[in-house]
Amino acid sequence: MGKRVGIIGVGQTHHAAKRLDASGVEIIAEAVTRALDDAALTIADIDAMVIGNMDHFENINYVDMWAVDGLGACMKPVFKVTTGGTTGTTVGACGYYHCASGLFDVVLAVGWEKNSESDTQAAIATCSNPALERDFFAGAIGPLATEYSMYMKAYGATEEDAAIVAARDRNNALNNPYAHSRQQVTVEDVLKSPMLSYPIKFLDMCPRSDGACAVIFAVEEKAKRLCAKPAWVHASVVRHDYTHFGDLEWTFMPTLERASAEAYKLAGITNPLKEFDVAELYLPASTCGVKWMDSLWFCEHGEAPKLVRKGTFQMDGELPINPSGGVISTNPIGATGLIRVGEAAWQIMGRAGARQVENVRKALATGFGGCSWSDVMILGADLP
Amino acid sequence: MERVAIIGVAQTKYEQNKPETFAELVYDVTRRALEDAGITRDEVDNVVSVSSDFWDGRTISSMAISDASGAFGKDITTVEGDGTFGALYGMMRILSGSFGVTLVCAHHKGTESNMNGITNCAFDPLVERRLGIDAVSSAALQARRYMTRYALKEEQFALVSVKNHGNAMRNPLALFPMEITVEDVMNSRKLADPLKLLDCSPVSDGAAALVLAAERQAKKLSTHKKRVWLLGVGHCSDAHHLGDRDLADTRALKDAARRAYAMAGINDPLREIDVAEVYDAFSYMEPLWLEGLGVCEDGRGCEYLERGWFDFEGRLPVNPSGGRLSAHAVQVAGLAELAECALQIRGEAGEHQAGEVKTALAHGVNGMCGQSHCVWILGR
């Protein structure tokens, strides 16, 4: 059987709309250096690397090869994984499997993006089937607007419910020095912000950022020796079940339901709302912070608005979600999922600074992308 | 450590201007690889796709094929790079204990793509790209450096093309089976000095798939004859900028090979390996990589090639399938090599069966001029 694996170091850049001071390779080097510092390691301690981003944003072919100087991967094993929006969690999972396989002891996983160099929506648009769906499901907002409209119609959720989530995440970001967008906003501010695609408004939606994140995974023996309090990987599951948006279920989030159900089974989670102490979720829009709570099995279908209104997911609530400010505050796309994993790991390691939730034993991290695909990683303070 | 086996393989015929979509190609090889393994989709618990947004001209390249690869309800991920790296990730996922049976699939439609533009984008955007450099012109630099360092001749490289196109005459899947002479290669159109058209692999369309299984599942699901064990693997990358490397130095390949040989217990590759599929995107690469693989001393690959060591009936048959020179679907290439090695070990390579094969080597490349290598040892 495979080895047990822990996260022993996390590093990320200070994310920004436009990093004119650094190239992509330099941004990667920043995150790698910070992760090594966080783990008190040097590059010589790293046995293998894995990297990911989305090709069409920066127009770099063979990113794993181009990034070698920034990764410190010269004369080391390295390859690239990429799955669109889920790339960050895909990279995290790949770092995990490197170690769990027993082939490598200490592995560096890196996600990055320099979206200021890209035509982000145009690049995303080409994921849809060119003949059938590109015209109406092009870009990131369309499918998200569609799914929340359907959810509102089915269960009476409101635009205000989403605005509560938006205000929560944006205000949480004030406690995160790495966040790209740090602004104090009220529910009113969100509701009054310009409409992008009904019912999603400007302050509901994620930005695009320049930034990178690096996470260091290690096999049990090494993790115990190198780190006082590793964040152990309890489960890593993905479901990328759809090729066409037209095949999706719209009143719930099917891939998130399937991925989280499987991950909970593997990690022995039976009551996720009670058992998780914190969650870092890839919520590309605040609307997802309403609807997808059903699909994470926190409640029955349609019950999420009640929990949101009750404050269940606020910093002082039963299950704080996105203490980092989440994706609507920071979104270097290829890194975004890995930031969720890194932030969740820091919460367990007690290194989350002003956004630290007290005594975190179990943390949930998710990724989202592609054709409404979902990745789930569960981390714990105790060995799995 | 638990062992992992290849229990099923499939490849399309390699052609130009294939009318099928990516998804149709992947569906075809997925279905046939499962058939070859004698299992159904239900027995596969995860999928690794190998594809590239650049070559597909479509972002999130795996989105076009997740249904076709049978990934619904399963864990699927994507390696962007050569198929040998995709198979490596497939094996890692099994060794982790999370999965029992991995389908690895790769697709490529080179004839819908723009080779020059796409490979130009593999170079530094600020300094190098504006030179117009691409896979062919950078390979020409490497060929020239290799010739200079070891006093080699273009005619010696041409022999690789003659051999591999000749081998392809026995492989019904190859794109360009041809009986040609050194003179034909020398007289073919010059693309980038010293490389001529027939020194370069052809842009091709195709797909390949492998079914990998953990030892327990492999023994339950498949017959002894179909099981080919993955005995060793290693990968390693050199520096990115061509100017930071000596292009005739194969140190990254040597490191990858060292890792694979150590894992598989190979001490003398020339004696212990019965057949090799080596990444011959350009003719000169075959002897250069054979040196890096430790099959012969540095600088002497061409000499042994001339002596017939790597011929179909030579001491170590290299690229009996016809190699990439006869059909090169980028990224599919490494997976096709692994499929070919598996067939050789199973004794099912048909007319290009290179005698009795116990141990085989497959070798894939990522990046320009062989920046990164992945070496596999397969056996019975």
Image: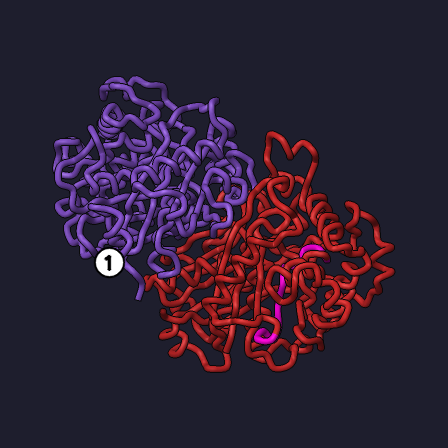
Chain colours: A purple, B red
- Residue A213 in the figure: left or right of residue B82: left
Check if residue A201 falls in the magenta segment: no
In this rendered view, identify the residue nearer to me: A318 or A125.
Answer: A318
- Reply above or below: A237 against B305: above
User: Which amino acid does the dot numbered 1 rest on?
Assistant: Leu
| Secondary element type, mark 1 | helix
Q: Position of residue A272 (x, y in %)?
A: 17, 48
Q: Residue at x 14, y 47 (%)?
A: A275
Q: Which residue is mark 1?
A: A266
Q: Is residue B207 in sight in this rendering?
A: no
Q: Residue at x 35, y 23 (%)?
A: A202
Chain letter for mark 1: A
In this rendered view, identify the residue nearer to me: B335 or B92.
Answer: B92
Q: Residue at x 18, y 57 (%)?
A: A268
Quadrant hosting residue A266: bottom left
- Residue A247 in the figure: left or right of residue B371: left
Q: Residue at x 30, y 38 (%)?
A: A38
Badge count: 1
Quadrant hosting residue B172: bottom right
Q: Which residues are magenta?
A: B271-283
- Reply above or below: B110 against A351: below
Q: Position of residue B113 (x, y in %)?
A: 65, 45
Q: Position of residue A249 (x, y in %)?
A: 34, 47
